[in-house]
Image: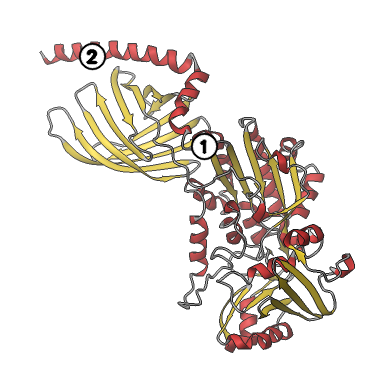
Amino acid sequence: MNKQKNKLSRRKFLIKTGQLVGSLLITGLGFPETNKAQALTYQQSQTNEHKYLLFHVDGISSKLFQEEWAAGNLENLQDFFAEAGVIKHGITYYPPFTQVVVSRIREAKGIEEGKLVDWDRYDPETQESRGKFGVFRNMVSTSQRRAQSNYIYGVPMLSTFGGMAILNLPDLLEKYGAVEYYWFATDTYGHMLGEESLKRSLYKFDDFFGLLTSSLADDVNVIIYSDHGMSYDEGTIDIKKRVESAVGDEVLNYAHPNLHLKNPQNKKRVAQKLIDETVLDYAFFRAEAGKIIGYHQDSKVTFLIEGKKISYSYQGQDTFNYYSAGYQGEFLTEKEWLDFSYNLEYPIAPVNICKLFNNPQIGEIVTVLNPPPIIGGGYVRKGNHHGLIAENMVVPILLKGPQVEHLYEKKYMRLEDLFAEIPGADFKDIEPERNKHSLSLATNDYRQGDKMFNLTLSPNYRFKLGADIMENNNYRLWGLYELYSGYLSRLWLGGGASKQANNDLEAMAKWKYKFKVKDLGVKYSNTTTHDSIINLFYRLNQNLDLNLIDFESLGIRYRW
C-alpha cells in the first residue's frame, strides 16, 4: 500500500515538475531581456535616478599617474577614458589621509566638518582618544555596508579577491543604482614595499578594470579618484617621539598634524621650539581671530582672513614661492587661490590650513612635515603621505558618463567639490524593498530520480522565508536574516522547523553562505538537523540558474 502510494505521489510530482520546468524554460530562457527588465522593477524605485560607479584608488599621486599613463602602462583606463574627463590636478584635503577623504568626499564636506582629522581622534572635552583602531572603525562605518568588505582586500595577497569583486559590480549597479568600490592595495604596497610595488598594484587594478568595462552600460557614470599621493625614503622616523622629546611637558595630545597643549597660552613659544628642535617644516597656530601664523626654519608665514578671503605674507624667505609665481599679497577667495596655485608646489596651502583650524577637533598647533623624512610605524616602512606639497596633495580624477560630462573640460578641482558638482549622486546605503523570490527544482539523486522542491520568498530586504519539500514526505520551514553582504559573498543566519517521515516536527538552526564571481558561484548551507549542502550554480540570465547540488543532484532555480 505504501509503495503504491509513493508511486502515485512520484507520478504527480513528475507531471507538475515537467509542467513547471517547461514554463520556466520558456519564460527564463526564451525572453531573457524582457525578463531582465521585469525582474528589476521591484527594486528600481529604491535607487538613484541615474547609475553611479565610484572607484577610490588609494595612494596615487597625479605625477605618478600621468607618468604611467604616458608610458602606456594603464591601457584599459586609457581606452575607457580616451574621450572622457581626466582631471590631472585634483587637490585633496590637508592632512592628506585616507580617513579624512573617505569620511567627507561623497557628501562634499570640507575639512572644517567631521571628526576625523588625524589617526587618534582626541576629544579635548573628555581628554580621551579613539586610537588608530577606533579611527579605522569610524572610517569604515562611513562607507556603504556592502563596500566595507573592500578594506580587507588591501591586505597583501588578498588584492586578487578585490579584483574578483570588481567583476560583480555590474550586477550590484542594477540592484542598488550607486556603488562605491575601494582599491586599497596600492596604498598598502606603497607603505610597505615602495613605489615599484605600488605601481604593480595599480597595473593590477587596470587589468581588472579592463575586464569590467565590457559589462558596463553606456548610461553608467564612472568616477575614479585617488585620495592622496605617496612619497618614499629608505628609512622612517617617529615624529611623535621627536615632538614629545622637544616639548613633551607642554603636550596634552599629539597625532600629526594635530597638537593639543596643556596651556593654550604657550602656543607661540611651543610652535617656535618645534621648529628649532625637530624636523618639522612648519608649525601653525592661531595668533588671534582672523590671523594664523606659521613658523619655518627660514620664514615666518602669516595668513590673514577677511570674510571669505585670505592673504599670505612672510618674513624671511617665501618658502611657498607664491610671490615668484606672481602673487602680490592680495586677499583671494578659495576659488582664486585654487586658480592661482593648483599647479604649484604648495597648492591652496593658505585655504587648507585656515579651514583646518575651523574644525572643532583641532588643537592649538597644526604641524607640517614634508617628506622626506617619512613618518613610520607598523607596516609603514618605505612610503607615506603627510606633507603639504603637491606630491602628497595632488591626485587624478577620471570621469565618464552622461551626468558627469559637464566636468570633462576641467583641468583642476578640489576633491571636496567633486560631488557638489554631481548633485544627483547619492551613495548612502540604498536598499530595495526586498530581495528576489525564487523557485527551485532538483533531483535529490540523479541515480535514483528522487526530487526536491524549494520556494523562497523575501518579505523584506535582508529577510528570507523558505520551504524545502522532498518527495519522501520530508520538509523544512525556515527563515533567514542577512548578517553580512559584500561584493563577493553573503552570509545568512536563522532557524525554523524540520519534519522527517514518521518523526515529530523538530526545531532547527540554519545558516547559509554564498560566494559568487560574475555568473558562477557556490552556496554552502547547514542546519542542526541535516547534513550540510554544497550548491554550485551558474547563472544563465537574470532569472534562471543551473545548480549542481553536492555533486550528485541537478536542478534549476527561477528568480523573480
In terms of depth relative to the viewer, which is nearer, 490 or 445? 490
Residue 309 in picture, x, y percent from top left: 73, 67
Q: Which residue is mark 2?
A: 10
Q: Residue at x 22, y 29 (%)?
A: 475
> Is 445 rendered above or below residue 75?
above
Q: Which residue is mark 1?
A: 172
Circle 2 Cα neighbour tier, 10 Å, few/some/many (<14 / 14–19 / ≥20): some
Q: Residue at x 31, y 27 (%)?
A: 455
> Is 540 rendered above or below residue 57?
above
C-beta proximity under 8 Å, tags 1 and 2? no
Q: Secondary structure at mark 2?
A: helix
Q: Residue 299 sits in which quadrant?
A: bottom right
> Can the viewer see residue 77?
yes
Label disc, if present, on residue 482 of the rendered structure: none
Quarter occupied by the C terminus: top left
The residue type indicated by label 1 comes to: Leu
> Can the viewer see residue 280?
no
